[in-house]
Image (tube, rainbow, N blue to C red):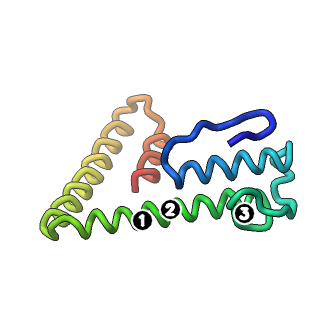
Amino acid sequence: MQAYYYSFDSTGCDPVDKILSAVACAGKAYHHTDDWYEQSSPQDDHTGGTPVDWIQNAAIEAAAEIERLRDQIYESIPKWQANELQREIEQLRSERKELRDLLVGLGAGIPAAAILRAEDRDG
């Protein structure tokens, strides 16, 4: 996964490696990121008409694979256990919100935006 000025090592996780490869191919195709919207023939096994498309499509494929694996895991465990895991997740989200509200109220120096970004990331 070599570009002109940078390279990536394989993570061993195919969906992630495909994203890294798309970024490397984009870097090989164009030196400047503002050119990544230019039409270009796909490199390697990437799909799309521009380097941005290659990266976006690789990310979409990775997300689909993650969803497929998550569903497979949930299907492989008993329904009661999946429900219990979901309840625990919801409880943790609720506790995190309460803690955020407390910290913000105390002026603990933790920017609310940083806490909200963590919530966005974690769902």
1 vs 49, left or right, is left
Q: At 81% across and 47% down in the image, what residue appears?
A: 33
73 vs 63, left or right, is left
Return the residue nearer the eye: 50 or 89. 50
Report the disc number at residue 19.
Answer: none
Give residue 7's position: percent from left, percent from top.
69, 36
Outermost residue, front direction? Answer: 44
Residue for badge 1? 67
In the picture, which quadrant includes the C terminus?
bottom left
Question: How packed is label 2: few (under 14 Cα within 10 Å), some, or many (20 or more)?
Answer: some
Report the disc number at residue 63.
Answer: 2
Quote the CA–CA distance across marks 2 and 3.
15 Å
Give residue 106's position: percent from left, percent from top.
34, 33
Q: At 25% across and 48% down in the image, what residue appears?
A: 95
**Amino acid type, mark 2:** Ala
Q: Quadrant of residue 49?
A: bottom right
Report the disc number at residue 53.
Answer: 3
Helix, strand or loop at disc 2? helix
Question: How packed is label 3: few (under 14 Cα within 10 Å), some, or many (20 or more)?
Answer: many
Quote the CA–CA distance across marks 1 and 2.
6 Å
